[in-house]
Image: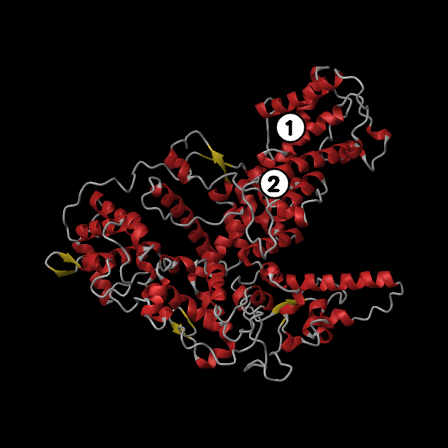
């Protein structure tokens, strides 16, 4: 109460709580957009916050990411800055300015130099705080700035529906869904999404998207070795001794053995993402990804755990390697009882992914790393924080090592990061085995590290046996968890990570980049707040993003031509190349069957990941990827055009209202029918609702007509479609004497090469 009163007094002294006026707005805007954005958030907050190295000082700030009231947070931080800026150590010697350059025993040493732009910002704030004149400077708040989305073209409701059904379910919208959207607009989408999120294809996409984030399919070992040898030595390799004697043919028996092992390993790899599927499918709080007291197992993986016999009655089909059910394991028992797991309940201390064998295996430790990698990915995955950004790199590590006995606990440039990272690392101390599984360190946990805990709270000794559960419980209550999950949902939908605050203070477009970050951050926080009100139901996050302007954005109009506006809106619109899996699903949705070639090595060439060595998808095409795009367009158009014409008209997907004998230029009716077919193709392949007289339809019409005309002027052309395109189809059914089937193939090829098909 006393501290709050002092802040208010400081604010009143500066006139910041007076009636609204230009001076108040200018001062507050200067603090938020310049002092806080360029110095406070980037530099001071690292130490001067609860749980930070300087939490005992008089200069303690509030982290906006941990606050539910951003306005009050900024008011508090401005008040703290104001109070410190008004303090002096001598005649006209600012305490704040001396601290930042490392004087007055500043614990953080020198964080700014006097010739840094950040120092000049602090110096100006000191002047303002002390009511001293300041030199004129650019206006920081443009009263005439247009609304953020002015000049942005939004998808119409039909195209938005198509985007989301392709993205989340790998299919085109149904006629009923299109009718609903045409009648009710965006209001129809939540109901449509509720039904869509019950489809199996949605959960395939959900697992795929979250594996892009957690990368659990990429641990460096055979999958069954996620189960430790000390605790599962007699069961984890069960496929090697499985009785296949009922298969008499030796070759078939060997193939059955390979399939058994492959299915077991695939099922084992799938457990972590199946946990996420189970949580979402059953509308459970999404915090269970860090608190669930169970894992997901199948008839095959339960054999690896040695619990199949007792679980067998619970499976619908005990022979299905991919039927997953939730199970609570008993405390681990070692081969020689040395590796027995401590447990006061008799059960394994499950904590969602945090204690998941595959997750731990994916992020193992070493004698020198000491679980710090696990701590780093914990912050990244569950709180959306890159701990490597907490402090700048040490410029002279040798000098620091020579000066301090234990730099990570004594040197301020090290402590700022390690005081955050090491306590989390300590919570993983009982998962010490280098291969990533349960096992205590023989000599006990390291004493030259900050003790196990969470954000200033120390792990009680009695909670040691369930340290990861203790961590999960606190993570679930941290406001940053909800924000991080909203950010993950954005990545799942767009393939892009959320924007980060710009770093280059001298950048002429800094303010534009900052505005883009802030606008997106507002949307993230709005969705996170609603996420909390739904009981942390992850489906609500996806629904909120889908109807947001950030997801609906499709491009820019000529209103957004100024470099500043283009910078603000740079991350919006059609900017993401589809991943290989998405391309295959899109081809399957449009043509009735996928291409079938964007897998394994071809998928890697096309920007895919293996979750181990390649962990980020390519967003821009390389030369090889461009070649694959052309091959795909040629091959899919070749096969699907011929196939579609070989179907009955009522069953056709591409050409339901035209036959190969309709030629351009023979009659107005023929040309109209061709143009209508082109309109249908644009809609089906690209999702564009073109007018029959639009430039795009005219361009496609001229392409079709030109191919037919060129063929008519050449002699000796095969009257049949290319053999590769008509292979496995009735030979006589695909006569193409007028070259129209091949002309239509050219149009489909052209459409498949458009950004509207390859990107979203």
Residue wearing tag 2: 625
The residue located at (61%, 22%) in the rendering is 698
Query: Is disc 1 placed on a helix, strand or loop?
Result: helix
| The N terminus: image quadrant | bottom left
Query: Is disc 2 placed on a helix, strand or loop?
Result: helix
The residue located at (44%, 66%) in the rendering is 477
For residue 406, above or below residue 197: below
User: For residue 755, which quarter of the picture?
Assistant: top right
Q: Mark 1 or mark 2: which comes first in sequence?
A: 2
| Mark 2 crowdedness (10 Å alpha carbons): few <14, some 14-19, many ≥20 | some
Count of marks placed on residues: 2
Q: Position of residue 113 (x, y in %)?
A: 25, 54
| The C terminus: image quadrant | top right
709 and 65: which is toward the camera: 709
67 and 410: which is toward the camera: 410
Would residue 89 be visible to someone looking at this image?
yes
For residue 403, above or below residue 207: below
Q: Is residue 628 left or right of residue 93?
A: right
Q: Distance of mark 1 from mark 2, alpha carbons?
A: 29 Å
Residue wearing tag 1: 679
Q: Position of residue 386 (x, y in %)?
A: 44, 58
User: For residue 283, which quarter of the picture?
Assistant: bottom right
Q: Position of residue 659 (x, y in %)?
A: 77, 26
């Amino acid at each position: 109460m006393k501290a709050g009163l002092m802040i208010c007094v400081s604010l009143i002294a500066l006139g910041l709580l007076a009636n609204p006026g230009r001076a108040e707005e200018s001062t507050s805007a200067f603090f938020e957009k310049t002092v806080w954005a360029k110095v406070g958030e980037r530099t001071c907050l690292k130490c001067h916050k609860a749980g930070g190295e300087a939490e005992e000082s008089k200069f303690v700030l509030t982290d906006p990411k941990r606050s539910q009231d951003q306005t009050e947070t900024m008011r508090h931080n401005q008040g703290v800055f104001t109070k410190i800026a008004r303090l002096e150590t001598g005649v006209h010697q600012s305490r704040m300015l001396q601290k930042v350059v490392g004087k007055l025993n500043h614990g953080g040493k020198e964080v700014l130099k006097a010739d840094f732009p950040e120092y000049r910002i602090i110096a100006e704030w000191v002047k303002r705080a002390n009511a001293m004149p300041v030199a004129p400077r650019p206006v920081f708040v443009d009263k005439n700035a247009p609304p953020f989305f002015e000049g942005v073209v939004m998808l119409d409701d039909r195209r938005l529906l198509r985007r989301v059904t392709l993205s989340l379910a790998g299919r085109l919208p149904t006629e009923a869904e299109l009718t609903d959207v045409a009648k009710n607009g965006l209001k129809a989408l939540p109901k449509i999404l509720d039904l869509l999120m019950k489809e199996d294809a949605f959960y395939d996409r959900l697992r795929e998207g979250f594996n892009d984030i957690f990368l659990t399919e990429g641990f460096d070992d055979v999958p069954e070795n996620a189960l430790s040898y000390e605790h599962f030595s007699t069961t984890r390799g069960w496929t090697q001794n499985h009785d296949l004697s009922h298969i008499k043919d030796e070759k078939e028996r060997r193939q059955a053995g390979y399939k058994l092992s492959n299915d077991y390993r695939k099922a084992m790899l799938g457990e972590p993402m199946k946990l996420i599927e189970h949580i979402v499918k059953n509308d459970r709080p999404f915090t269970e990804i860090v608190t669930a007291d169970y894992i997901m197992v199948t008839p095959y993986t339960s054999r690896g755990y040695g619990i199949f016999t007792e679980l067998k009655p619970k499976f619908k089909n005990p022979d299905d390697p991919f039927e997953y059910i939730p199970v609570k394991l008993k405390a681990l028992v070692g081969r020689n009882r040395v590796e027995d797991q401590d447990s006061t309940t008799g059960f394994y201390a499950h904590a969602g992914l945090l204690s998941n064998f595959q997750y731990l295996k994916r992020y193992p430790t070493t004698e020198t790393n000491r679980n710090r990698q696990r701590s780093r990915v914990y912050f990244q995955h569950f709180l959306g924080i890159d701990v490597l950004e907490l402090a700048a790199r040490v410029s002279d590590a040798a000098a620091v090592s020579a000066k301090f006995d234990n730099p990570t606990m004594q040197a301020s440039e090290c402590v700022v990061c390690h005081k955050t990272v090491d306590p989390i690392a300590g919570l993983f101390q009982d998962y010490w085995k280098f291969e990533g599984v349960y096992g205590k360190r023989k000599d006990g946990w390291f004493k030259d590290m900050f003790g196990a805990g969470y954000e200033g709270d120390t792990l009680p000794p009695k909670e040691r046996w369930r340290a990861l559960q203790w961590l999960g419980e606190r993570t679930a209550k941290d406001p940053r968890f909800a924000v991080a999950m909203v950010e993950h949902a954005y990545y799942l939908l767009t393939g892009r990570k959320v924007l980060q605050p710009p770093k280059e203070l001298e950048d002429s477009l800094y303010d534009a980049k900052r505005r883009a970050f802030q606008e997106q951050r507002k949307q993230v926080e709005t969705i996170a707040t609603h996420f909390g009100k739904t009981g942390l139901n992850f489906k609500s996050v996806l629904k909120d993003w889908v109807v947001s302007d950030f997801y609906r954005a499709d491009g820019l109009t000529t209103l957004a031509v100024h470099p500043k506006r283009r910078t603000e809106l740079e991350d919006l619109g059609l900017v993401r190349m589809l991943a290989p899996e998405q391309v295959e699903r899109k081809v399957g949705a449009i043509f009735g069957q996928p291409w079938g070639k964007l897998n394994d090595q071809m998928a890697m060439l096309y920007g895919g990941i293996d979750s181990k060595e390649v962990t980020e998808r390519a967003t821009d095409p390389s030369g090889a990827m461009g070649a694959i795009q052309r091959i795909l367009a040629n091959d899919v158009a070749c096969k699907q055009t011929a196939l579609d014409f070989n179907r009955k008209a009522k069953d056709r997907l591409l050409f339901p209202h035209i036959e190969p004998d309709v030629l351009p230029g023979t009659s107005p009716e023929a040309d109209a029918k061709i143009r209508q077919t082109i309109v249908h193709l644009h809609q089906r392949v690209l999702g564009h609702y073109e007018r029959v007289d639009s430039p795009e339809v005219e361009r496609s019409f001229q392409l079709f007509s030109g191919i037919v005309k060129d063929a008519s002027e050449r002699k000796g052309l095969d009257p049949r479609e290319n053999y590769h395109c008509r292979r496995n189809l009735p030979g006589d059914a695909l006569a193409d004497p007028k070259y129209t089937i091949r002309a239509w193939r050219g149009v489909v090829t052209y459409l498949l090469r458009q950004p509207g098909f390859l990107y979203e």
